[in-house]
Amino acid sequence: MVVAPELSSALREALSAHAEIAVSYLFGSRARGDAREDSDIDIGLVFRRGGDAPESRERIAVQVAADVTRATGVERVDVVDLEEQGPIFCHRVLSEGERIHEADAARRVDFESDVLMRAFDFRPTYELATQGKVSALRRWLRRKHDPGAALVQAGRAEGEPR
């Protein structure tokens, strides 16, 4: 992950102004180092314990997006509450992203260990579901490009009654 130092610095400055945020991550193309000039900035947030209402978290996320835009000059900023995302998405953020701000190390460790446990527990189900979708797509493509093959696969020769 190669994040430009000036971007990291601008993001840290924008995020450190929000006491409600325990830890934040940069992810997506800017974290991977393959961003284009028009790429957005993707930020994932983990809030401090204390149970801010969802509306409050949404308000903070909107404010963070505005602050990041102001600090970086990038108009397209996506901010997500990582605690509202699934385990595979969060695992991807942790493994491919970069932590850019940390105000509560204990909260970060709790969040990251929970994500890892849930992702490893869920991965077999995810892979099974994904493989099922890939297999279904392959079958659909075969039928689309060779309708006669679909009838033979179904146990009937073309033109046979059902």
Image (cartoon, rainbow, N blue to C red):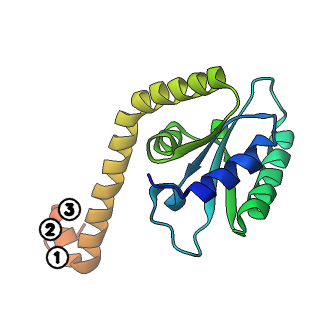
Q: Which mark is residue 23?
A: none
Q: Are marks 2 and 3 in contact (CB under 8 Å)?
A: yes
Q: Is residue 133 left or right of residue 138?
A: right
Q: Which mark is residue 154?
A: 3
Q: Is residue 111 above or below residue 61?
A: above
Secondary structure at numbered mark 2 = helix
Q: Amino acid at mark 2?
A: Val
Write down the quadrant of residue 46 in the picture. Answer: top right
Q: Badge 2, how many Cα within 10 Å: few under 14, some, many 20+?
A: few
Secondary structure at numbered mark 1 = loop
Q: Is residue 136 left or right of residue 38?
A: left
At horizontal 67% and vertical 58% (from top left) the residue drawn is 78
Secondary structure at numbered mark 3 = loop
Judging by the rendered image, the residue that carries numbered circle 2 is 152
Judging by the rendered image, the residue that carries numbered circle 1 is 158
Point out the tag, 1 or 2, that comes first from the N-terminus. 2
Q: Is residue 162 visible?
A: yes
Q: In front: 142, or 47?
A: 47
Q: CA distance from mark 1 to mark 2?
A: 7 Å
At horizontal 57% and vertical 70% (from top left) the residue drawn is 39
Q: Are marks 1 and 3 in contact (CB under 8 Å)?
A: no
